[in-house]
Amino acid sequence: MFIIFGTRGLKHTVNESPILSNACPNCNNGNLVNKLYRRWFTLFFIPVIPLDVVDRFYQCDSCKSAYNENIRTVLQQSQNEIDESQKRAKLVFGKALVASMTHMSIIDGDFAKEEEREIMDAIEGFSEMKDELLAIHHNVKDNANKGNQVFNYLNEARNALSAEALMNILAQAAVVLLADGSIEKEEEDLMKEYLIACGLPKEMYQTIIDKLKQKDISELKEGQLN
């Protein structure tokens, strides 16, 4: 008899933490609920033993945007400061997303037109910063990870964004990974390096693939700003 075991990440609600009512900066009326990602030991793919907590964050119960726990401090600021914080977070998200998507698309040495289309569609979702993201795309396309630029963008995102937002970045990067219909070993290894750069266990690779399969890409983009 074969015994199959491993680990995977699961998201939980922190029931003892108070809900921040009507506090979501993105949709303005959603409640922010405290969540955490926890690693679980699995037996025959069933979570049986809780392990370490990967991250805690707040998620809107309406628009599904996710925020670092320091959102409680941000909410005490003026509306202009909140708007500026959101703008910075969106730029950090966009840069990490486009850099990782582009890098993922060239890692196997074959930059497919389907991959290019996915990247261009992602950039269109950031119209106010389109030129800057296009420049990042062309730089990574021409120079790959020269100067560790891709991982620098991911490290910046790690310091500014929630684990849920980081998972959304990597799930959208996985769209490129799957765009040509197959997952090459170089792509899978790179995705696991991205996870480590984001401070997430590499075992959460399957969680990202599951997230991609379960959600339409437009739903992933709804939670991208935080």
Image (cartoon, helix red, strand yellow):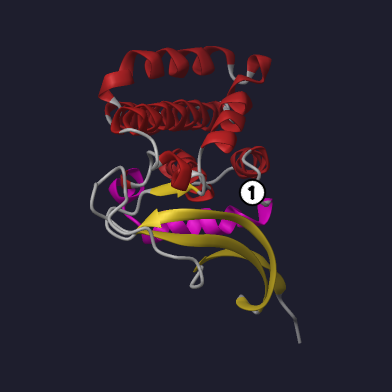
> Can you say whether 49 is above or below 163 in the image?
below
> Which residue is found at the position 40% from the left and 55% from the top?
59
Whether residue 111 is visible: no
**The magenta stretch spans which residues?**
202-221
Q: Residue at the spot x=27%, y=20% of the render?
A: 128
* Farthest bottom residue in view: 1
Quadrant location, the C terminus: top left
Is 62 situated left or right of 214 in this image? left
Query: Which residue is depicted at the point 38% across and 38% down?
Result: 225
Q: Quadrant of residue 10?
A: bottom right
Q: Look at the image and tell me whether residue 156 can be seen.
A: yes
Q: What residue is shown with label 1? A: 200
Q: Is residue 20 above or below residue 193?
A: below
Quadrant in the rendering for residue 52:
bottom right
Does 16 sit left or right of 9 as displayed? Answer: left
Which one is in front, 185 or 154? 154
Of 67 and 219, the residue lying toward us: 67
Q: Quadrant of the N terminus?
A: bottom right
In the rendered image, residue 22 lying in the magenta stretch gets the answer: no
Q: Is residue 211 magenta?
A: yes
x 53%, y 18%: residue = 140
Q: Nearer the viewer, residue 121 or 12?
A: 12
Where does residue 20 sit, x and y in percent of width and height? 37, 58
Instruction: Give the structural element (helix, strand or loop) at label 1.
Output: loop
For badge 1, the amino acid type reads Leu
